Image (cartoon, rainbow, N blue to C red):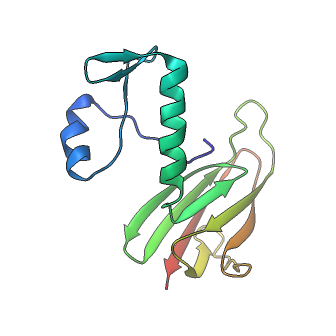
Amino acid sequence: MPHGMIPIAPIESSLMLEKQNVPYFVSNAKVGILGDERVPANTFGKMITKTVAEGEKVLPILVKGASWSVIKIDENHSRLILVDPGYIDPQERKVTVSFQNKKPKSIVDILSNETLKVAGGETIEVTVPAGSMRFIDIAYR
Protein backbone atom coordinates (compact mmCIF):
# COMPACT_ATOMS: atom_id res chain seq x y z
CA MET A 1 0.00 0.00 0.00
CA PRO A 2 1.37 3.45 -0.76
CA HIS A 3 1.07 4.58 2.88
CA GLY A 4 2.17 1.39 4.61
CA MET A 5 -0.13 -1.01 6.34
CA ILE A 6 -3.52 0.30 7.43
CA PRO A 7 -4.87 -1.93 10.20
CA ILE A 8 -8.49 -3.00 10.41
CA ALA A 9 -9.95 -3.57 13.87
CA PRO A 10 -13.35 -4.25 15.42
CA ILE A 11 -15.41 -1.28 16.57
CA GLU A 12 -14.70 -2.33 20.17
CA SER A 13 -11.20 -0.84 19.67
CA SER A 14 -12.66 2.67 19.34
CA LEU A 15 -12.42 3.55 23.05
CA MET A 16 -8.73 2.65 23.17
CA LEU A 17 -8.04 4.66 19.99
CA GLU A 18 -9.90 7.69 21.35
CA LYS A 19 -7.90 7.56 24.60
CA GLN A 20 -4.68 7.55 22.55
CA ASN A 21 -5.96 10.32 20.23
CA VAL A 22 -5.60 8.05 17.18
CA PRO A 23 -7.91 8.82 14.26
CA TYR A 24 -10.08 5.97 12.99
CA PHE A 25 -12.94 5.43 10.57
CA VAL A 26 -16.05 3.29 10.64
CA SER A 27 -17.43 1.88 7.39
CA ASN A 28 -19.57 -0.96 6.13
CA ALA A 29 -17.39 -1.03 2.95
CA LYS A 30 -20.12 0.82 1.02
CA VAL A 31 -20.51 4.05 3.00
CA GLY A 32 -18.71 5.77 5.84
CA ILE A 33 -20.39 6.07 9.20
CA LEU A 34 -19.97 9.14 11.42
CA GLY A 35 -21.98 8.66 14.59
CA ASP A 36 -25.46 7.82 13.31
CA GLU A 37 -24.92 9.46 9.91
CA ARG A 38 -24.09 7.58 6.69
CA VAL A 39 -21.55 9.45 4.54
CA PRO A 40 -21.36 8.78 0.75
CA ALA A 41 -18.21 6.97 -0.38
CA ASN A 42 -16.86 9.91 -2.45
CA THR A 43 -17.05 12.27 0.54
CA PHE A 44 -15.81 9.66 3.01
CA GLY A 45 -12.88 8.76 0.74
CA LYS A 46 -11.72 12.39 0.75
CA MET A 47 -11.84 12.43 4.56
CA ILE A 48 -9.74 9.26 4.74
CA THR A 49 -7.22 10.59 2.19
CA LYS A 50 -6.80 13.83 4.16
CA THR A 51 -6.32 12.01 7.48
CA VAL A 52 -3.79 9.57 5.99
CA ALA A 53 -1.81 12.47 4.45
CA GLU A 54 -1.69 14.21 7.86
CA GLY A 55 -0.58 10.98 9.55
CA GLU A 56 2.12 10.43 6.94
CA LYS A 57 3.89 13.57 8.19
CA VAL A 58 4.58 12.06 11.62
CA LEU A 59 5.79 8.66 10.45
CA PRO A 60 9.51 8.00 10.97
CA ILE A 61 9.79 6.13 7.63
CA LEU A 62 8.17 6.41 4.18
CA VAL A 63 8.68 3.87 1.39
CA LYS A 64 8.16 4.11 -2.37
CA GLY A 65 8.42 1.17 -4.73
CA ALA A 66 7.35 -1.80 -2.56
CA SER A 67 4.77 -2.94 -0.06
CA TRP A 68 6.06 -2.31 3.45
CA SER A 69 5.48 -2.33 7.17
CA VAL A 70 7.50 -0.99 10.10
CA ILE A 71 7.56 -2.60 13.52
CA LYS A 72 8.70 -0.45 16.44
CA ILE A 73 11.03 -2.63 18.53
CA ASP A 74 11.77 0.06 21.13
CA GLU A 75 12.34 3.84 21.23
CA ASN A 76 15.62 3.54 19.28
CA HIS A 77 15.03 0.55 16.98
CA SER A 78 12.62 -0.40 14.19
CA ARG A 79 12.36 -3.30 11.75
CA LEU A 80 11.35 -2.43 8.19
CA ILE A 81 9.80 -5.20 6.10
CA LEU A 82 9.86 -4.67 2.33
CA VAL A 83 7.84 -6.95 0.03
CA ASP A 84 7.70 -7.29 -3.75
CA PRO A 85 4.00 -6.49 -4.36
CA GLY A 86 3.90 -8.35 -7.68
CA TYR A 87 1.89 -11.45 -6.82
CA ILE A 88 0.88 -11.95 -10.45
CA ASP A 89 4.01 -10.38 -12.00
CA PRO A 90 6.93 -10.70 -9.56
CA GLN A 91 9.88 -8.54 -10.48
CA GLU A 92 12.87 -6.87 -8.91
CA ARG A 93 11.78 -3.63 -7.23
CA LYS A 94 13.85 -0.48 -6.81
CA VAL A 95 12.83 0.99 -3.48
CA THR A 96 13.42 4.38 -1.87
CA VAL A 97 13.23 4.56 1.91
CA SER A 98 12.99 8.07 3.35
CA PHE A 99 13.64 8.88 7.00
CA GLN A 100 11.76 11.75 8.59
CA ASN A 101 11.43 12.89 12.19
CA LYS A 102 14.18 10.46 13.27
CA LYS A 103 17.62 10.03 11.73
CA PRO A 104 19.15 6.54 11.60
CA LYS A 105 22.60 5.79 12.98
CA SER A 106 22.79 2.28 11.51
CA ILE A 107 20.81 0.23 9.00
CA VAL A 108 21.38 -3.50 8.52
CA ASP A 109 19.64 -6.08 6.32
CA ILE A 110 19.22 -8.87 8.88
CA LEU A 111 19.21 -11.73 6.33
CA SER A 112 22.27 -10.72 4.29
CA ASN A 113 24.00 -8.83 7.14
CA GLU A 114 24.59 -6.01 4.63
CA THR A 115 25.10 -2.57 6.16
CA LEU A 116 23.24 0.09 4.22
CA LYS A 117 24.46 3.68 3.95
CA VAL A 118 22.14 6.65 4.25
CA ALA A 119 22.43 9.32 1.56
CA GLY A 120 22.58 12.66 3.36
CA GLY A 121 20.94 11.14 6.42
CA GLU A 122 17.56 11.08 4.72
CA THR A 123 17.20 8.23 2.19
CA ILE A 124 18.45 4.82 1.17
CA GLU A 125 17.96 3.04 -2.13
CA VAL A 126 17.51 -0.75 -1.95
CA THR A 127 16.40 -3.54 -4.23
CA VAL A 128 13.78 -6.11 -3.30
CA PRO A 129 14.35 -9.29 -5.34
CA ALA A 130 11.47 -10.61 -7.47
CA GLY A 131 8.92 -12.49 -5.39
CA SER A 132 10.86 -11.85 -2.21
CA MET A 133 11.17 -9.76 0.95
CA ARG A 134 13.85 -7.83 2.84
CA PHE A 135 14.04 -7.34 6.59
CA ILE A 136 15.97 -4.24 7.61
CA ASP A 137 16.81 -3.24 11.16
CA ILE A 138 17.21 0.46 11.87
CA ALA A 139 18.86 1.97 14.95
CA TYR A 140 18.22 5.67 15.60
CA ARG A 141 20.43 8.32 17.14
**Count of numbered badges drawn on the protein:** 0
In this rendering, would 39 be left or right of 21? right
Q: Residue at x 50, y 79 (%)?
A: 139
Q: Position of residue 141 (x, y in %)?
A: 49, 86
Which of the 4 image quadrants contains residue 119? bottom right
Q: Is residue 33 visible in the rendered structure shown here?
A: yes
In this rendering, would 7 be left or right of 60? left
Location of the N terminus by quadrant is top right
Q: Position of residue 60 (x, y in %)?
A: 51, 66
Q: Residue at x 58, y 67 (%)?
A: 136
Q: Is residue 5 visible in the rendered structure shown here?
A: no
Q: Nearer the viewer, residue 1 or 20?
A: 20
Q: Position of residue 78 (x, y in %)?
A: 47, 68
Q: Position of residue 99 (x, y in %)?
A: 60, 69
Q: Residue at x 56, y 79 (%)?
A: 104
In this rendering, would 89 be left or right of 36? right
Judge whether 37 appears above or below 94 on screen.
above
In this rendering, would 19 be left or right of 129? left
Judge whether 7 appears above or below 97 on screen.
above
Q: Nearer the viewer, residue 119 or 24?
A: 24
Q: Residue at x 45, y 18 (%)?
A: 29
Q: Nearer the viewer, residue 57 or 9?
A: 57
